[in-house]
Amino acid sequence: METLQKNPTLSPVALFLNLLLQCLLPLSLAILCSPLAQAQGTYPNKPLRMLIPFPPGGPADIIGRAAAFKLGDALGQQIVVENRGGAGGNIAVEAVAKAAPDGYTLLLLSSGVVANQSLYAKLPYSLSRDFSPVAPLASFPLLLAVHPSTKLSSVKELISLARSKPGVLNYGSAGSGGGAHLAAETFKLEARIDMVHVPYKGTGPAVLDLVAGQVNVMFASVPSVMQHVRAGKLNALAVTGTRRASTLPNIPTVSESGLPGYHMESWFGVMAPAGTPADIISRLNGLLGRIVQSSDFQERLATEAGAPVSMGVEAYSEYVRNELARWAKIVKDTGARLE
């Protein structure tokens, strides 16, 4: 500053420009050294983390870890998977919503979390406002299973019995507001039947009571009931997807076996905090798309009767928007609600 003032050769304009340069240089360096700039320039230069909004062991955990492991290999950085269950998944989702939008924190999104936007009257986050869609991973049908004592062997027979004896049949679920509950309530609505809901604290207890005959019907994840179907302890009537599961080709869809148009699938994808740089989102989308199409990932999905799903960022963004609207209608039509 003093040197510039003592230099008689500098004009007032040159002096002003030099002063401006001295003021802006530290700010420019600070911006270039910021986490966001580093993320864009050398991403990734440190481990990432993926939050899974459910406990270990379930489909979300299995698929999330498989995708995170392969994505870490592709990026050359470790991805630390963190299971943060509770409040229907809302705890983990809120944490990611508040994370820095630098590409180092990702969320495993599920259709159940999408439904939460309508199931809860108030949430501390908004999927449409606080997140940037990255890429889808997979979809999974549920299996409509009944206890053999019902003597039912098709969806048509189930609907006929339920219509002739309203309120006599009951169905179990892993809990109110979950995918199995909403699948059953949507089935009731579209089939114009009445069955009594028996909510449990988890899939395991519900399946045990279904096998014991304490409940008659259940929409459940394929892995949770298939061993009992194969052992003859349960009858599998249909899968809830838009097409038959590749690993269960002899089991029809609900739509083709008695309730045309019905479908209900669980799905998983990846999201990042809103504001994450577009080039990072695009890179992650491309890598995850290749992972989803890999043979070993698809083999892993097949063990859960899942199907790979891949699409570009814009298509996935539109898909999430459509799912938000679809689940809002399902929640409204069924009257489901959570506090």
Image (cartoon, rainbow, N blue to C red):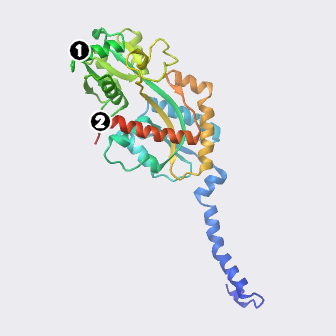
Q: Residue at x 51, y 41 (%)?
A: 318
Q: Position of residue 332 (x, y in %)?
A: 32, 37
Q: Quick check: can you spot residue 7?
A: yes
- Residue 310 falls in image quadrant: top right
Q: Residues within 10 Å of mark 2 (few under 14, many from 20)?
A: some
* Residue 336 - label: 2
Amino acid identity at mark 2: Ala
Instruction: Tell me the SS state at disc 1.
Output: helix
Return the residue nearer the eye: 14 or 194.
194
Residue 215 screen position, x and y as percent: 26, 19
204 sits left or right of 98 in the view: left
Q: Which residue is mark 1?
A: 164
Q: Look at label 1 and name its amino acid.
A: Ser
Q: Is the residue under label 2 in contact with that under label 1 (CB below 8 Å)? A: no
Q: Quadrant of residue 261?
A: top left
Q: Which comes sooner in the sequence, label 1 or label 2?
A: 1
